Image (tube, grey):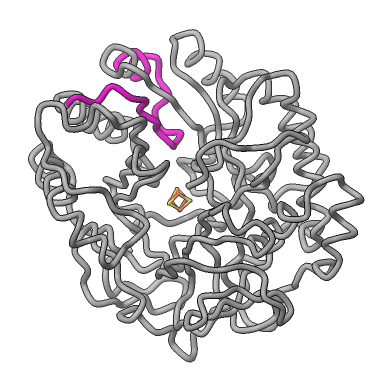
C-alpha cells in the first residue's frame, strides 16, 4: 500500500523506505494504541496443550505439530510489530533451522517471542531459539533456498487489495519503487546486488553476496519467482513477466521462472510465454475451493475451478509446469478433500499450501469454524497426503514459510533445503 495510506481503518503511515531496504527492528513502526489488531477476541486453538497426544493420534512427529500450532495460533512479543519473521530452531531439534512469518497478537495465544532473550516460549516454557527477529515487511525482493532463488515483487504488491485473507494489510510496505521498464528493472537489480552487504546489516536473512550484474551474473540462480498481486489485466501481467525474463536471460539466467498468479490465461499469452521462457512454471492462485467470489478480488475469482483445471491441462500440454497456491483454514475439510482429489491429477508440482493466519477481527470471521481446532490442520494434512500419494510430488519447504509440513511428509523425512 502507498506510504501513509489508510486501509481498513488501520493507519499504515510509515517513514519512506527505499526499495529493497528492510527496516531494522529498532526502527520498526509502532502499532497504534487504537489499532484494529486482534486481541482477546481471536479464538485460540484449544487443544494446543495436547501436542504430544495429537502427535501420537495422528502419527505425526511432535515437532511438525508444534510448528503447525505456532503458525495457526500467532504469538505475542515484546516487539512493537504486527508481523514478525525469523529463523527458528526448536529446542528438541536445534540443528534444524526453519524460517517463519507470524502475526503478532496482544494476547490469547500460548506462544510468546522474546527479542531480548532470542527465545520463543510455549505456555511459559522455552520452546525454540529465535535468530534474526525482523519486521515482516512487504518487500520488492528477497532470497530463498540459500540465496539461489530470487523472489521479485515488481508490481508493488502492497498496493493490491480485495482479498479478505490477504496479509499485506498488516505489513509495512517497502516495495514502493517503480519497476515498469527494463531500465527501471536494471537500476533496481544493480542496486540490490551492488549493495547487498550493506542491506544484509538490516535484513540478515534476505541478502546475497555482493555481485554486479554482468553477462552471466545469474547463471547460478535456480529460480526467479514473480509474486506481484494482481495487475488488473493479462496484458500487463504478461508484459511484466516477459520483461523480467528478458533481462535475467540476457544476464545468464537459465533457471525456472515461476509466475504466481492467475491473470495469464489466454492461448496467445501462453504461447508467448512458451516461446520466450526456457523453464516456465505457473502456480495458479486458487487459495480456496469455496466462497471464491466472496473472499477474493474479482480478477482472482474470475479464474474458476473449472477454468483452473482447463488452464493446468493447457499449460501441461505446452510444457509449462503447473501447480497452485492454497490456504488451509478457509474451506471445510470435506471441500479440501474434494478439491485436492480433483487437482492432484492436474499438476506437475506440489501445491503451495499455506496455513491461514488471521490478523484482525474481520479476518477471523472468514476462517471456517472447524479451523479453530488444531485437529483441523492435521486432518487437512492427511487429506492432502492421501490425494497426492502416487503422484511423486512432495512439498518444497524452502518455498513455503507457512506450511503443513516441516520434518516429515506422508511418513517420510523431508530433508531438502529448508530456507
Ligand atoms: S491478489 Fe489478493 S492476496 Fe494477492 S496481494 Fe492482491 S489482495 Fe493480496
Foreground residue, 114 or 35?
114
**Image coordinates for residue 147, horizontal then vertical, percent:** 34, 43
Question: Is residue 289 found left or right of 219 in the rendered image?
Answer: right
**Image coordinates for residue 212, horizontal then vertical, percent:** 11, 42
Question: Is residue 253 found left or right of 384 in the rendered image?
Answer: left
Question: Is residue 418 found left or right of 335 in the rendered image?
Answer: left
The correct choice, above or below, for 137 with respect to 352 in the image is below
Q: In the image, what residue occupies the spot 44% across and 61% down?
A: 168
**Image coordinates for residue 149, horizontal then vertical, percent:** 36, 38
Q: In the image, what residue occupies the spot 89% across and 51% down?
A: 56
Q: Is residue 266 magenta?
A: yes
Q: In the image, what residue occupies the spot 55% across and 14% down?
A: 313
Magenta residues span 252-272
Foreground residue, 72 or 51?
51
Foreground residue, 97 or 18?
97
The correct choice, above or below, for 258 with respect to 12 in the image is above
Amino acid at each position: 500500500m502507498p506510504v501513509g495510506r489508510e486501509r481498513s481503518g488501520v493507519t499504515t503511515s510509515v517513514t519512506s523506505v527505499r526499495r529493497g531496504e528492510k527496516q531494522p527492528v529498532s526502527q520498526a513502526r509502532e502499532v497504534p494504541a487504537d489499532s484494529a489488531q486482534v486481541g482477546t477476541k481471536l479464538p485460540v486453538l484449544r487443544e494446543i496443550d495436547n501436542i504430544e497426544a495429537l502427535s501420537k493420534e495422528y502419527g505425526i512427529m511432535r515437532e511438525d505439530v508444534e510448528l503447525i500450532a505456532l503458525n495457526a495460533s500467532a504469538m505475542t512479543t515484546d516487539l512493537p510489530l504486527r508481523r514478525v519473521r525469523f529463523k527458528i530452531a526448536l529446542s528438541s531439534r536445534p540443528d534444524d533451522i526453519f524460517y517463519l512469518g507470524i502475526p503478532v497478537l496482544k494476547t490469547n495465544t500460548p506462544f510468546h517471542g522474546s527479542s531480548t532473550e532470542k527465545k520463543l516460549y510455549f505456555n511459559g516454557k522455552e520452546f525454540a531459539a529465535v535468530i534474526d527477529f525482523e519486521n515482516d515487511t512487504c518487500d520488492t525482493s528477497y532470497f530463498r533456498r540459500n540465496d539461489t532463488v530470487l523472489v521479485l515483487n515488481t508490481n508493488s504488491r502492497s498496493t493490491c487489495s480485495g482479498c479478505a485473507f490477504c496479509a499485506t494489510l498488516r505489513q509495512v510496505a517497502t516495495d514502493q519503487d517503480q519497476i515498469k521498464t527494463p531500465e527501471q528493472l536494471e537500476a533496481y537489480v544493480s542496486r540490490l546486488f551492488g549493495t547487498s552487504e550493506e542491506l544484509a546489516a538490516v535484513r540478515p536473512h534476505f541478502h546475497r553476496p555482493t555481485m554486479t550484474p554482468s553477462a552471466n551474473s545469474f547463471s547460478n540462480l535456480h529460480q526467479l519467482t514473480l509474486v506481484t498481486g494482481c495487475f488488473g489485466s493479462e496484458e500487463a501481467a504478461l508484459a511484466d513477466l516477459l520483461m523480467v525474463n528478458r533481462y535475467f536471460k540476457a544476464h545468464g539466467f537459465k533457471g525456472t521462472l515461476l509466475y504466481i498468479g492467475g491473470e495469464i490465461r489466454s492461448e496467445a499469452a501462453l504461447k508467448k510465454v512458451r516461446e520466450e521462457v526456457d523453464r516456465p512454471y505457473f502456480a495458479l492462485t486458487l487459495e480456496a475451493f469455496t466462497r471464491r467470489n466472496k473472499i477474493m478480488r474479482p480478477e482472482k475469482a474470475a479464474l474458476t475451478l473449472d477454468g483452473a483445471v482447463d488452464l493446468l491441462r493447457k499449460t501441461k500440454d505446452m510444457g509449462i509446469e503447473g501447480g497452485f497456491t492454497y490456504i488451509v483454514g478457509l474451506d471445510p475439510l470435506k471441500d479440501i478433500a474434494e478439491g485436492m482429489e480433483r487437482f492432484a491429477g492436474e499438476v506437475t508440482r506440489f501445491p503451495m499450501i499455506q496455513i491461514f493466519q488471521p490478523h484482525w477481527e474481520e479476518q477471523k470471521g472468514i476462517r471456517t469454524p472447524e479451523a479453530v481446532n488444531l485437529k483441523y490442520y492435521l486432518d487437512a494434512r492427511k487429506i492432502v497426503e492421501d490425494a497426492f500419494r502416487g503422484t511423486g510430488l512432495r512439498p518444497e519447504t524452502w518455498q513455503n514459510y507457512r506450511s503443513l509440513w516441516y520434518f516429515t511428509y506422508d511418513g517420510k523425512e523431508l530433508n531438502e533445503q529448508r530456507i
